[in-house]
Image (cartoon, grey):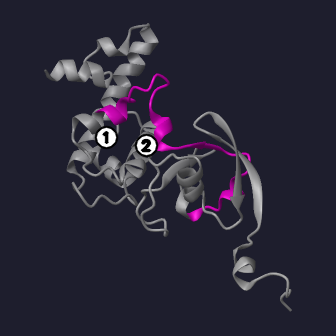
């Protein structure tokens, strides 16, 4: 039986809340959430990391992709309360520490592999994850890795080209690191180098 002292509209808005602690892009965050909130809503609404997008709420499009404890995850399918203590990387966390683009991001930029950018989180995480496993992938392997990430603007030709170029840039950068050379001094090691190279 409903209490007579609580108006119906007020009662309807009283929802269970809790504090959770997350490490997001290397920063410790303590956040008050509602039990029903999805991780994508917390990342966007409470942390202001709007690079993670809301597309379908079904895990179909990949726009909400991020990493939880190193695993690629569709954050529209995850309750924020379920990831207490987790380490999360959003698309904003893919850039280098100084804010410059990583090799895959630079390749996407150079190849015009996105227009509106809505699908970008899923594409970037998928390609980076592939390159962690296979340093020199084939086009077919890239296309397989992109399954589950929808692009409604460009199609996938430029995205696949960017992924293959990103793989090459990453190999160059890691070779440079191994011999103590600045990757930016090598063609296509970083976006600054590629801009100069193409000019």
Is residue 104 magenta-colored?
yes
**Nearer-the-camera pick, 2 or 35:** 2
Label 2 secondary element: helix
Badge 1 crowding class, 10 Å Cα cut-off, few under 14, some 14 to 19, many 20 or more, is: many
Label 1 secondary element: helix
Residue 163: image tag = 1
Q: Which residues are magenta?
A: 77-106
Q: Position of residue 127 (x, y in %)?
A: 39, 43
Q: Position of residue 160 (x, y in %)?
A: 27, 46
Circle 2/circle 1 CB separation < 8 Å: yes
The residue mark sitting in front, 2 or 1, is: 1
In-image side of 3 versus 107 (left or right): right
Q: Position of residue 125 (x, y in %)?
A: 44, 45
Residue in the picture at 31% in, 40% down: 163
Q: Is residue 58 above or below residue 194?
A: below
Q: Is residue 169 above or below residue 162?
A: above
Place residue 181 in its image quadrant: top left
């Amino acid at each position: 039986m409903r209490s007579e002292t609580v108006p119906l509209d007020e009662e309807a808005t009283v929802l269970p809340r809790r504090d959770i602690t997350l490490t997001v892009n290397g920063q410790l965050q303590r956040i008050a959430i509602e039990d029903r909130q999805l991780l994508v809503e917390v990342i966007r609404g409470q942390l202001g990391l709007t690079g993670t997008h809301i597309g379908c709420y079904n895990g179909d499009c990949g726009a909400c992709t991020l990493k939880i404890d190193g695993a690629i995850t569709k954050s529209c399918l995850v309750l924020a309360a379920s990831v207490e203590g987790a380490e999360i990387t959003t698309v904003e966390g893919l850039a280098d520490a100084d804010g410059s683009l990583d090799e895959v991001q630079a390749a996407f930029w150079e190849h015009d592999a996105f227009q509106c950018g809505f699908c970008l989180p899923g594409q970037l995480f998928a390609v980076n994850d592939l390159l962690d496993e296979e340093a020199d992938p084939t086009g077919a392997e890239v296309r397989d890795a992109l399954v589950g990430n929808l692009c409604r603007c460009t199609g996938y030709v430029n995205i696949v080209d960017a992924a293959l170029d990103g793989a090459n840039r990453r190999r160059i950068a890691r070779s440079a690191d191994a011999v103590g050379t600045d990757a930016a001094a090598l063609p296509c090691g970083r976006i600054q180098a590629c801009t100069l190279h193409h000019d």
